[in-house]
Image: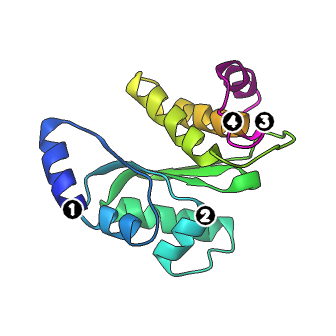
Amino acid sequence: FYRRVADIASPRGIKLVLDSSGAGLREGLEGGGVHLVKPSLGELRGLAGQELDSEDAIAAAAMEIIDKGQAELVAVTLGHRGALLAQKGRTLRLPAVPIEARSAVGAGDSFLAAMVFALSGGQAVDEAFRFGIAAGAAALLTPGTGLAHPKDIERLRASVAS
């Protein structure tokens, strides 16, 4: 299925974003043609089949996806440790925004939604990554299954390391 989606999307100029785990993540990347993939650290560990217990190991696993031509961008969410972005020739690691979390529900989805929103609006990859970190942090401020609020995202965006 994923291979066929990439084969259809790429020739039409459609950029494919993949947010999956387990077999869906593995098979989705096998076909290549993914613009952005957003695994959590646990999902990347499962894909790599390794513990990935250091920042260098995480970066190497993300870069392997890039080097194989499976994705152009890999954004690995690291929970309270922030996130890592890999793209051809480089990685960028940014810490999490220091906040008091009320719930972790939806943080990864908010991160990815903000990144896609920023990229589709023409923002540079690094800025989209920072916007994603701010949105993920904003989602942590809402209890239960509440969504991130735009005013919190904008406020926290200024706190994201550059």
Q: In which quarter of the image is residue 130?
A: top right
Q: Earlier in the sequence, mark 4 or mark 3?
A: 3
Q: Is the magenta stretch mostly helix, strand or loop?
A: loop
Amino acid type, residue under disc 4 in the picture = Gly
Give the quarter of the image for residue 110: top right
Q: Does residue 144 belong to the magenta stretch? A: yes
Residue at the (58%, 59%) spot, across then down? 40
Task: Kindly identify the residue that appears in the image at 68 percent across and 74 percent down.
Answer: 53
Q: Which of marks 2 and 1 is nearer the N terminus?
A: 1
Task: List x then y, in percent, for residue 111.
Answer: 58, 40
Task: Quickly name the residue at label 1.
Answer: 1
Q: Quadrant where the N terminus lies? A: bottom left
Q: Can residue 4 be seen in this view?
A: yes
**In percent of the image, x 74 and y 43: which residue is there?**
144
Check disc 2: other Cα within 10 Å, few if <14, some if 14-19, many if 20+. Answer: many
Residue 98, which numbered label?
A: none
Q: Residues within 10 Å of mark 4 (few under 14, many from 20)?
A: few
Label 4 – label 1 distance at C-alpha: 32 Å
Number of labelled discs? 4
- Residue 3 % position (x, y): 20, 61
62 left or right of 33? right
| Rendered location of residue 151, percent (x, y) | 70, 18
The answer to whether marks 4 and 1 mark residues whose Cβ atoms lie closer than 8 Å is no
First reached walking from the N terminus: tag 2 or tag 3: 2
The magenta region covers: 140-162
**Labels 2 & 1 near each other (Cβ < 8 A):** no
Q: Is residue 87 magenta?
A: no
How is the model colour-coded? Answer: rainbow
Does the residue at mark 4 contact the one at mark 2 (Cβ under 8 Å)? no
